[in-house]
Image (cartoon, helix red, strand yellow):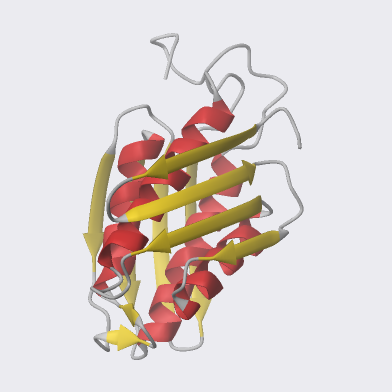
Amino acid sequence: MSERSASVARATAETEIEVALDVDGTGESEVDTGVGFFDHMLESFAKHGLFDLTVSCVGDLDIDDHHTVEDVGIVLGRAFADALGDKSGLERFADRRVPLDEAVASVVLDLSGRPLYEFSGEFSQASVGEFTSVMARHFFRSFATNADATLHVEVAGENAHHEIEALFKAVARALDDATRVDDRRQGVASTKGQL
């Protein structure tokens, strides 16, 4: 594990989650949430962001996937916030577009310390496997809020699997860009002196 790593656990009446994150990884992942498509998306997120990621979640899937997806977003966001510390030297901003066949996702990210989330677009099908498509939108709201990030995303396409996968890949690539360290920078990328 690098210096920029974190382990976060969260237990509620709805979910029990453990996340281990290494921002400076190689894209290795071990994910088990009980929702197959969601596992696939988190593995893709790790691979394309070059993050080492372990996620274990036991949730109330007998109800639906909402609490599992939402709460993993919360814990993963906290893990990024913890791993990045005071954000000294970070690039801070990133802008990425990622296609997947007919679908495309656009992401603009600022590791600002000010959580804000904006989403534009619709998913073409209501679900992918056991994953409710709108939960992709909700996942990144939970993530941005807990990572203290400003995140603007947009998706378009004809296939929800492609739209959601493009979204996870685009956010991962943007995070990889924004979390890079610029050796020329002293302190944080802000006239305020903190993020």
Report how many numbered discs are placed on residues in the image: 0
Front-most of residues 170 and 50: 50
Is 60 above or below relative to 86?
below
Examine the rendering and report whether any part of residue 195 can be seen.
Answer: yes
Is 151 above or below relative to 172?
above
Looking at the figure, which quarter contains the C terminus?
A: top left
Q: What residue lies at 70% left-to-right and 19% top-to-bottom? A: 184
Q: What residue lies at 55% left-to-right and 74% top-to-bottom? A: 40
Front-most of residues 78 and 34: 34
Would you identify the image quadrant in which residue 164 lies? Answer: bottom left
Q: What residue lies at 38% left-to-right and 44% top-to-bottom? A: 11
Q: Looking at the image, which residue sits at the far front?
A: 13
Looking at the figure, which quarter contains the N terminus?
A: top right
- Indicate the position of residue 59 as horizontal and vertical percent values: 37, 63
- Indicate the position of residue 103 as horizontal and vertical percent values: 42, 82
Q: What residue lies at 50% left-to-right and 33% top-to-bottom? A: 92
Would you identify the image quadrant in which residue 69 lies? Answer: bottom left
